Image (cartoon, grey):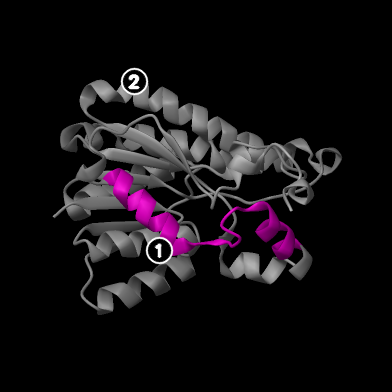
């Protein structure tokens, strides 16, 4: 049985991705720093007989990362896929982003991807496995209030290239997924009707994506169906990136 390690797996895209792996017969280590929610979703799945292991970890802490990878290997015997999904979505204007705020975003969104991949590399060498880093459309196109978030995700895209080039000789594939606007509990709660309408107007498919649609692409990149795909960033965004030049009003 193959094993996937998914970070930020207690909710949202991470949990949907974990469920997609489970549906395909994989064992999954669910990693998150929200212990209460992690244990809840893990218990729900183990109660149904799913091969799931809950791993409490803050991906910005090197010691916790090492322990998490070691625990996963002890529990499942190997790691065939690593999905670096854990992230902090902290938006604010440049002048209101002090260095502490900047570092809080970077240590999870960027440092966490570096630390997790580095710790899992020996296991991935053994399995000739795959890594998928989750960036954001904000790493491909600039937007207001995202000086730290957007920069961190752009760095994840570059880190993906570095990892793909260096780890390819071991048969490890590394790719990146850049989600566009996704319908989650958080986005439904914080996006006003005006914001939703503006996004719909700017997205060629005229809607938000779903967590399940992101999970399908992530799962594909970790599977043998993507055996010759590495070093790529795939924007799963309904065409949002393609509209980066030109005003929506001019297209009407």
Helix, strand or loop for disc 1: helix
x%, y% of residue 90? 68, 50
The residue depicted at 32 percent of the width and 44 percent of the height is 221
Which residue is farthest left? 1
Q: What residue range appears in magenta?
A: 195-222
Which numbered dot is residue 16? 1
Residue 51 vertical placement versus 165 (above, below): below
Please name whichever residue, 55 or 2, is drawn nearer the observer in this view of the structure: 2
Q: Nearer the viewer, residue 129 or 198?
A: 198
Residue drawn at x 48%, y 65% as measured from the top left: 11
- Mark 2 nearby-residue class (10 Å; few <14, some 14–19, many ≥20): few
Position of residue 101 measured from the top left corner of the image (x, y, whole percent): 72, 43
Observer-nearest residue: 209 or 118? 209
Residue 166 is labelled as: 2
**Which element carries disc 2, helix, strand or loop?**
helix
Residue 99 in the magenta stretch? The answer is: no
Answer with left or right where residue 207 lies relative to residue 26. Answer: right
Kindly report the distance in space between the C-alpha atoms of the residues bearing marks 2 and 1.
Answer: 29 Å
Residue 15 visible somewhere in the drawing: no
């Amino acid at each position: 049985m193959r094993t996937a390690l998914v970070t930020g797996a207690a909710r949202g895209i991470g949990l949907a991705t974990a469920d997609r792996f489970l549906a395909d017969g994989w064992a999954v280590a669910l990693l998150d720093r929200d212990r209460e929610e992690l244990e809840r979703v893990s218990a729900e799945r183990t109660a149904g007989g799913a091969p799931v292991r809950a791993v409490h970890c803050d991906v910005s802490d090197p010691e916790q990362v090492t322990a998490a990878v070691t625990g996963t290997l002890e529990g499942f015997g190997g790691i065939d896929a690593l999905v670096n999904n854990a992230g902090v979505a902290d938006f604010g204007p440049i002048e209101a982003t002090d260095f502490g705020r900047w570092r809080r975003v970077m240590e999870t969104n960027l440092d966490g991807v570096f630390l997790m991949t580095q710790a899992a590399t020996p296991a991935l060498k053994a399995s000739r496995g795959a890594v998928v880093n989750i960036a954001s459309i904000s790493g491909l196109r600039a937007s207001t209030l995202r000086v730290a978030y957007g920069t961190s995700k752009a760095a994840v895209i570059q880190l993906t290239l570095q990892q793909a080039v260096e780890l390819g000789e071991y048969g490890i594939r590394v790719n990146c997924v850049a989600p566009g606007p996704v319908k989650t509990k958080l986005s439904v709660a914080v996006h006003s009707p005006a914001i939703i309408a503006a996004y719909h107007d700017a997205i060629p498919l005229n809607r938000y994506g779903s967590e399940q649609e992101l999970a399908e692409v992530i799962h594909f990149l970790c599977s043998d169906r993507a055996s010759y795909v590495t070093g790529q960033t795939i924007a799963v965004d309904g065409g949002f990136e393609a509209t980066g030049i030109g005003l929506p009003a001019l297209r009407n």
